[in-house]
Image (tube, helix red, strand yellow):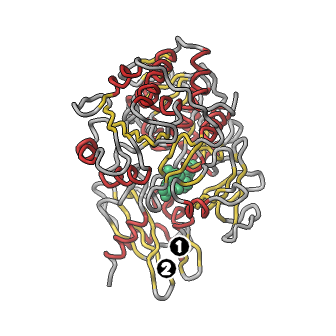
Amino acid sequence: MNYQLSVPQVLEQAYLQSPEKEVIFDGYKRVTYEELYQSVQLMASALASKGIQKGDRVLVCLPNWHEFVTIYFGLAQIGAILVPCNTRYMKEELQFILENSGAKAIFLAEEYGHFEFLKPILNKDGNFQHIFTVRFKDPECTSYEELLELGKKSEPPQVEIDSIEDVFSILYTSGTTGHPKGAMLTHKNFVHTATVSAECMNCTSNDVFLIAVPVFHCFGMIPGILTAIVVGGKMVFMEEFKAEKALTLIEQEKISVHHGVPTMFILELNHPSFKQFDLSSLRTGIIAAAPCPEEIVRKIRTIMGCDIVVSYGMTESSTTLTITGFEDDDFLRSETVGKAAPGAEVKIVDNNRVELSPGVVGEIAAKSFGIMKGYFNSPEKTAEALDQDGWYYTGDLGTLDENGYLRIIGRKKEMIIRGGFNIYPREIEEILYKHESVLEVAIVGLPDTVLGEITCAAIRLKPGKTEDQYSMKTYLKDKVADFKIPDHFIFVEKLPVTASGKIKKIALEQELKETLKP
Ligand code: ATP
Ligand code: MG
């Protein structure tokens, strides 16, 4: 496999190898490599004739539709920058990304309600000049189909791409710990990480990838779409995850690589008709984004017959930084996130960024060909996150063992210091998640005049369950040291979440400060 190619060259290579082969099925259309490659050429020339040039940012706010892939490679071919947006973004969030990225154009679907508020600001101020509509039409905008028609009138421009220097995508982080930050990822960041992911899973052109994670997230864009293309495989998109639909697709399309977050696998394993599906085509896949209980890893491997690997990474590292191997047992695949992936180095450092010994908790730092160039338009944040030697400081806390396996402890910003003792909320949250009444929980620190900080657990109970402070404290009593037991338990109807579903602790902290005011 060649790490040096640019993103469009990866597609060209796969297309030349097997033009007739099917590359995408999205439930709506089946597309071959030939069709994809040709539509990418048309898209590239159409975008160029609309004035989109190398370095211009183009927002793409679409669900898992095949059109996303044409736009992805069309933009790559002309050196323009793809800025994917979560379809669930509300007005303010989308507006923030539009302004922050200085985008010239956006591709939109109708169903998410974005068109109504974007249309009035088109051509008003800033750089925003085009709305391209996908699977719907508007008299004042150009549709996806019209772009493909327009593309027939000229040849795609020849644009030189420097894989190492040229940014292919600005991917906004989930915004769990503050405003989303735009990570600038180069062609090389993408191709390297997609290739490494393919190698770690022994992927070949026979593989069929189930892509149920959103294509607008780095997980869908890199180990999903690009890995499938790197090996010349096929991908099956799901617009919305439903366990029964996923199981049907696995059987029908003979899925071999199943990526997902733990919840997807849990829902599939618990589906009442699970046993009726033939899942024998499943081979492997990546599970990431959240810790996965050992029991689930074991069931995915034994009952589903899917030799799933666990990976850890973030937007800034183009995903995979560490990954478990096929030789690792269920315990290592649930307790750790594996070892540094090929081409990556991982270390644990203290507050002065000095490397710590195995077993000691500190910040996880990493170096790899997947690490971003920096944050877009944000030299201060870039300087905080990246040092002179190319190390990226993740803001996550973890430990490395003697054999190089990484354990995630939690986020640095979330660590609470209560009366001089460090508390890692995630440790307690994981125990509370095992309580039969708990649906969702988040623990945050609140200021306290005596202890510096005290802890508060906000819990959303399962329907029909009742609990109180006393019952929760009793539950934790023999499970953790007393200083780790939250000082307060608050029962809530819902927790504030980001568009990708992660709990926003800063917003929660604000809410709880108000609630607990004396
Ligand atoms: P922001 O940076 O805007 O606050 P975010 O960090 O949630 O948001 P992402 O880049 O989508 O945005 O998420 C990366 C983070 O997800 C990692 O830094 C880590 O905290 C968590 N994570 C990723 N993979 C795993 C995993 N396998 N196990 C546990 N946590 C993980
Ligand atoms: Mg982050």
Q: Quadrant of residue 249?
A: top left
Residue 187, percent from left and from top: 60, 38
Judge the density around disc 1: few (<14), some (14-19), many (≥20) Cα neighbours within 10 Å.
many
Residue at the (42%, 68%) spot, across then down: 457
- Mark 2 Cβ and ligand 1 under 8 Å apart: no
Say which residue label 2 marks: 453
Residue 153, percent from left and from top: 40, 18
- The answer to whether residue 354 is left or right of residue 217 is right
Q: Quadrant of residue 107?
A: top left
Residue 289 against residue 141 in the figure, above or below: below
Residue 262 against residue 155 in the figure, above or below: below
Residue 409 against residue 149 in the figure, above or below: below
Residue 444 numbered mark, or none: none
Amino acid on which the number 2 mark rests in the picture: Glu
Say which residue label 1 marks: 416
Residue 307, percent from left and from top: 61, 33
Q: Residue furthest bottom?
A: 450
Mark 1 residue element: strand
Q: Quadrant of residue 347?
A: bottom right
Question: Mark 1 to mark 2: distance in Å?
Answer: 7 Å
Residue at the (69%, 71%) spot, across then down: 352
Amino acid on which the number 1 mark rests in the picture: Ile
In this view of the protein, which residue sits in the foreground, 434 or 208?
A: 208
Residue at the (57%, 65%) spot, across then down: 412
Residue at the (73%, 43%) spot, across then down: 343
Q: Disc 1, disc 2: CB below 8 Å?
A: yes
Residue 472, percent from left and from top: 41, 68
